[in-house]
C-alpha cells in the first residue's frame, strides 16, 4: 500500500527484503533508506529515524497474530513462523510477562504449521492465507493495549539524515492517499473477500504517518526491553 503512493522517482529503486535483514542491508551500505522493525533501533541507535513516516497499529489489524492450542490454562512455548523480526521475539516475551506473568520460550518453526498442535505466532503474509488472521489474536492490539498508545511496528531510517528529508518532501498526506484508494488497492490483493472486508472495516487502526502520538509511543516501546533486563542501556532516538 505504501509503495502505491510513492512517487515514481522512489518506486524505481524500491526493493523488498526479509524484515530480519533490513537494518543489516542499510548498515552495509546496500541501500540509502529502509523501513525497519522498530526494535532494530536497539542494536542500531545511530540510525536517523523519520519523525514523519512509519507503520503503526492500534487495533485488530497487525503484521503478526497468535494462534493458540485449545483448552489451555497456561503455556510456556511460542513457535514463530513467517517474516520474523526482532519485534516479535522481544515484544512477545515482554507482553506475556507483563500481561499474563508468564515467561515464554521462543522457538522458530521450521516445519509445516499444524493448527491446534502448537502455540504459534505467525508474521507477515502467512496470516492472509485463507483468512487465517480472523481466528488469531493480534500482536499489535495487545501491544497497543499494554502501552495505551499506538504500536509503532516499522520506522523509516537512514544513516544520513538527508535521505529522510527527501522522503519527507516526497511523501505527504500518506494516510489520506491510501484511505482514498483503499478499495482499488484491496482489489490487487490475492486474498479472500472476507479478509478484504475485515481489512477495510478495521483500516482506521493503521497509520503510515508519524504524529506526536507515534513519536512518544516509539520512545515508550524502546524503553520496555531495558526495564525487563533484555538490554543494558536505554536508547535515545535520533529523529529527523
Image: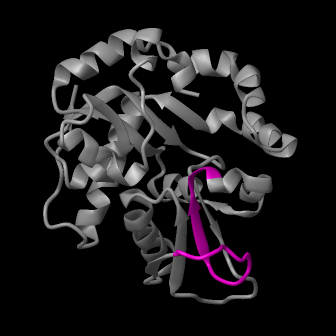
- Does residue 133 appear left or right of residue 86 in this picture? right
Q: Residue at x 64, y 56 (%)?
A: 126
Q: Position of residue 235 (x, y in %)?
A: 18, 51
Q: Is residue 86 above or below residue 24?
A: below
Give 121 or 15, whichever is nearer the viewer: 15
Q: Is residue 115 magenta?
A: yes
Q: Is residue 65 above or below residue 71?
A: above
Give 102 or 109, whichever is nearer the viewer: 109
Q: Residue at x 13, y 61 (%)?
A: 233
Q: Which residues are magenta?
A: 109-125
Q: Position of residue 50 (x, y in %)?
A: 30, 29
Looking at the figure, which quarter contains the N terminus? top right
- Does residue 180 appear left or right of residue 90 in this picture? right
Q: Residue at x 34, y 16 (%)?
A: 168
Q: How many marks?
A: 0
Quadrant of the image occupied by residue 118: bottom right
Q: Is residue 79 above or below residue 141?
A: below
Looking at the figure, which quarter contains the C terminus? top left
Chosen colour scheme: one colour
Amino acid at each position: 500500500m505504501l509503495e502505491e503512493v510513492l512517487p515514481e522517482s522512489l518506486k524505481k529503486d524500491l526493493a523488498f527484503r526479509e524484515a530480519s535483514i533490513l537494518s543489516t542491508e542499510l548498515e552495509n551500505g546496500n541501500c540509502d533508506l529502509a523501513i525497519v522493525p522498530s526494535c532494530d533501533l536497539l542494536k542500531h541507535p545511530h540510525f536517523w529515524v523519520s519523525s514523519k513516516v512509519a507503520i503503526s497499529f492500534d487495533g485488530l489489524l497487525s503484521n503478526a497474530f497468535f494462534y493458540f492450542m485449545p483448552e489451555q490454562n497456561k503455556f510456556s512455548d511460542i513457535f514463530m513462523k513467517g517474516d520474523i523480526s526482532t519485534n516479535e521475539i522481544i515484544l512477545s516475551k515482554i507482553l506475556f510477562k507483563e500481561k499474563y506473568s508468564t515467561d515464554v520460550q521462543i522457538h522458530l518453526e521450521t516445519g509445516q504449521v499444524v493448527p491446534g498442535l502448537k502455540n504459534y505466532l505467525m508474521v507477515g503474509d502467512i496470516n492472509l492465507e485463507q483468512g487465517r488472521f480472523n481466528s488469531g489474536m493480534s500482536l499489535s492490539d495487545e501491544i497497543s493495549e499494554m502501552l495505551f498508545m499506538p504500536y509503532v511496528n516499522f520506522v523509516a531510517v537512514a544513516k544520513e539524515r538527508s535521505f529522510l528529508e527527501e522522503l519527507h518532501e516526497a511523501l505527504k498526506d500518506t494516510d489520506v492517499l491510501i484511505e482514498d484508494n483503499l478499495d482499488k488497492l484491496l482489489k490487487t490483493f490475492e486474498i479472500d473477500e472476507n479478509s478484504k472486508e475485515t481489512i477495510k472495516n478495521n483500516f482506521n487502526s493503521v497509520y503510515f504517518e508519524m504524529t506526536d502520538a507515534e513519536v512518544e509511543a516509539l520512545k515508550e516501546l524502546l524503553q520496555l526491553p531495558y526495564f525487563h533486563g533484555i538490554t543494558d542501556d536505554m536508547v535515545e532516538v535520533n529523529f529527523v
